[in-house]
Image (cartoon, rainbow, N blue to C red):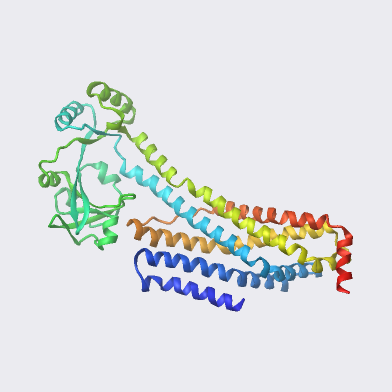
């Protein structure tokens, strides 16, 4: 067990050193592997120390025997408990990542989709007619436009942004120079997305090249899900740079109560179909549905990994059941009933699962941090804030305890129903 503990510490050290030796996703996955292997190897020594501590503070011979016997069983159950710990840590890590993404994504949608209606006229002449008709009927018409570009020697996209309170109040900036919106409106520079910030090492005050021209970076904004580098120009600067690009897309600011009537009027007057026009509520709902479908497999994987760990515990306990008769028969002979011995077996399984869940929690949180701060940044170019979900942890701990108790149920039932002659036979064989 000492050698196993040394190997576990060595794996954790290698995980910590991985970013210094390699870069990119290679370092991220090396960190994940080192963390999980090291934590799994350290679990049995850690449980042994906890059980030894509990045994030293136990009162009464039965309690002392319970802790000592649990520690004696640890080598036979260590592999199954390591599987349970890995399953719990992975579930905590992945569920924390998904929960953080869900909460952040919902807030980000509220910021990015601030306008009430988004439409695409399809043709420039038609767009001019629609804009002229909308002018007296809406609070603001915000033109939307984008063009492909080479940004910091990377394929990317340049977007146009009107100078309006919609963006000043809601656009999600991670970092910016003072008076960023006034300077952007004056055409003094550009905003860049977080992907470009991480991959090119650019930030506010630096210069970024766009199709050969160098412009100051005024701010960095979050842009979840976009794989490309992106820069934002004020609308006037965008039109000056791309004068021949047709302007066909708009975001409309209008009172929420007037949205249904305006949508119906646009559909009837200009023949705009559903794929050409979406209101804010339906667009957010569509985005969130896509998000939920993307991570729907997570719940199934959680159940699968816990089920595999439960099967491992069950097979281990079933294998140990007959081998444990020499330890249990003397207690039965001293007066403990078979029913009480069976209850102690169930208690032991639940207690070991609970201890494993407690030790798996910090491993799962470190795993979540690695996924959010290392792997996600290297793979996608953006970093999510880490949120904590204690209710999910409690649910996983209860599920782990239930799985362990169910795994111990059959061996405990067989002990309870075992004929006394079998227990007496232990002493015959010993003699």
In the picture provided, is 298 more to the left or to the right than 258?
Answer: right
Residue 371 position in % (x across, y down): 42, 59
Q: Locate the N terminus by quadrant.
A: bottom right
Residue sticking out furthest to the top: 268
> Vertically, is 121 above or below 111?
above
Query: In the rendered view, would you say 235 is above or below 314?
Result: above
Q: Residue at x 49, y 53 (%)?
A: 95
Depth check: give the residue in front, 81 or 264.
Answer: 81
**Which residue is painted at 59% across and 68% down in the image?**
43
Can I make out residue 228 in this image? Answer: yes
Judge left or right: residue 390 versus residue 336. left
Q: Position of residue 33 (x, y in %)?
A: 47, 66
Across and down, in percent, residue 64 comes to 77, 70
In the rendered image, which quarter is residue 25 located in?
bottom left
Is 419 located above or below residue 132 in the figure? Answer: below
| Res. 57 in view | no
Between 309 and 138, which is closer to the camera in this rendering? 309
Direction from residue 156 to residue 79 in the image, left or right = right
């Amino acid at each position: 067990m000492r050698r196993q503990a040394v190997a576990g510490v060595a794996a954790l050290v290698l995980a910590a050193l991985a970013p210094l030796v390699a870069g990119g996703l290679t370092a991220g996955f090396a960190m994940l592997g080192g963390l999980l292997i090291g934590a799994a190897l350290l679990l049995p020594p850690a449980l042994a120390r906890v059980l030894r501590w509990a045994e030293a503070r136990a009162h009464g011979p039965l309690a002392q025997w319970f802790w000592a016997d649990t520690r004696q069983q640890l080598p036979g159950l260590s592999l199954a408990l390591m599987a349970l710990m890995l399953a719990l840590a992975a579930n905590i890590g992945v569920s924390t990542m998904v929960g953080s993404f869900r909460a952040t994504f919902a807030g980000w949608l509220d910021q990015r989709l601030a306008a009430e209606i988004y439409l695409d006229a399809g043709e420039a002449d038609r767009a001019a007619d629609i804009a002229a008709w909308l002018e007296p009927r809406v609070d603001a018409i915000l033109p939307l436009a984008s063009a492909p570009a080479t940004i910091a020697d990377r394929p990317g996209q340049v977007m146009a942004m009107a100078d309006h309170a919609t963006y000043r109040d809601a656009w999600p900036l991670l970092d910016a120079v003072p008076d960023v919106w006034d300077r952007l409106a004056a055409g003094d520079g550009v905003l860049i997305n977080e992907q470009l910030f991480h991959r090119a090492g650019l930030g506010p005050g630096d210069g970024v090249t766009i199709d050969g021209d160098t412009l100051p970076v005024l701010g960095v904004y979050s842009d979840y899900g976009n794989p490309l580098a992106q820069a934002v120009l004020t609308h006037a600067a965008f039109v000056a740079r791309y004068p021949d690009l047709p302007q066909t897309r708009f975001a409309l600011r209008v009172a929420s109560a007037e949205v249904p009537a305006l949508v119906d009027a646009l559909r009837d007057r200009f023949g705009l179909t559903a794929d050409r026009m979406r209101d804010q509520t339906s667009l957010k709902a569509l985005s969130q549905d896509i998000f939920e479908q993307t991570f729907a497999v997570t719940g199934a994987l959680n159940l699968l990994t816990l089920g595999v760990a439960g099967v491992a515990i069950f097979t281990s306990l079933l294998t140990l059941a007959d081998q444990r008769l020499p330890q249990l028969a003397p207690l039965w002979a001293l007066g403990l009933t078979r029913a009480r011995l069976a209850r102690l077996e169930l208690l032991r399984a639940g207690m070991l699962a609970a201890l494993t869940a407690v030790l798996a929690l910090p491993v799962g949180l470190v795993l979540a941090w690695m996924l959010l701060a290392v792997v996600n940044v290297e793979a996608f170019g953006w970093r999510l804030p880490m949120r904590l979900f204690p209710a999910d942890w409690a649910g996983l701990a209860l599920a782990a305890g239930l799985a362990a108790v169910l795994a111990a149920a059959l061996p405990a039932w067989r002990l309870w129903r075992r004929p006394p002659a079998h227990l007496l036979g232990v002493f015959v064989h010993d003699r």
